[in-house]
Amino acid sequence: MSAPGRVVTAAAVVFDFDGTIVDTEWPEFVTVRDEFRAHGLELELDEFRHVVGRADHPHWTQWLRDALGRDYDLDEVVQRRRVAHHRMIAEQPVRAGVVELLDRAAAAGVPVAVASSSPLDWVDRHLRERGLHRRFVAVVTRDHVVNAKPWPDLFLAAVAQLSVPPAHAVAIEDSHHGCTAAKDAGLACLVVPNPVTAGMDFSRADLVLDSLADATPGVLGLP
């Protein structure tokens, strides 16, 4: 599946983390949805999609409180959901094609970074647990910028650390908001949706693939 546009020869590659390197989005949705259901409510996937890829939204516990119209046992709900969420996340593999692309970038001498709207401790921990942390020259998160996605700050900070002009870098994203941030920063953007983000508006993407494993040699100017 592709979208009109181009993907430049990459002098640098900047990965999103959640939903792109590891599909953390589906466990996030399922475990939050289950807490809504436990309170007799339904959280629709379309409603959840609106906030995927951005940090400037109310916490899901506030959504639940607003939907219920009353307070609830916050500690109990958060702890129950945390246990389920951590169990599901631990079972998520690195998404198809990610390691292969990292190998090709390394072989070509192309530096790679992460630009994520999640906190540094979250991203760092999951990269280390999967043996990927050393593969990235820089890991830039919402702890490092004033405005996370959909603003371009994260991508601008990432390419600055890689000493590469934005126009010579390619972002790999999974969401509309992430793609918006990358394009506004001046990067080309390759989008690989996941089950939560599939169906979003990716009209600004340079290329949309069903799997990063479909990124054939040459798509990013890599061997």
Image (cartoon, rainbow, N blue to C red):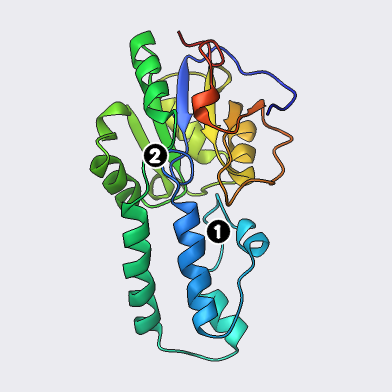
Please say if 23 is above or below 186.
Answer: below
Residue 121 in percent (x, y) is at 30, 51
Residue at position x 54%, y 79% from top? 37
Q: Which of 119 and 43 is in front in this view?
A: 43
The quadrant the C terminus occupies is top left
Residue 139 in percent (x, y) is at 35, 37
Please say if 117 is above or below 217.
Answer: below
Q: Is mark 2 on a helix, strand or loop?
A: strand
Residue at position x 49%, y 90% from top? 71
Q: Looking at the image, is mark 2 or mark 1 earlier in the sequence?
A: 1
Q: Is residue 43 left or right of residue 31?
A: right
Residue 48 is drawn in which quadrant?
Answer: bottom right
Q: Which of 154 and 223 is in front in this view?
A: 223
Q: Is residue 59 visible?
A: no
Residue 72 in percent (x, y) is at 46, 89
Q: Which mark is residue 70?
A: none
Q: Can residue 182 be seen in this view?
A: yes
| Residue wearing tag 1 | 56
| Residue wearing tag 2 | 140
Q: How far apart are marks 2 and 1 (CA)?
A: 17 Å
Label 1, residues with CA under 10 Å away: few <14, some 14-19, many ≥20 = few
Residue 80 in percent (x, y) is at 35, 76
Q: What element carries label 1?
A: loop
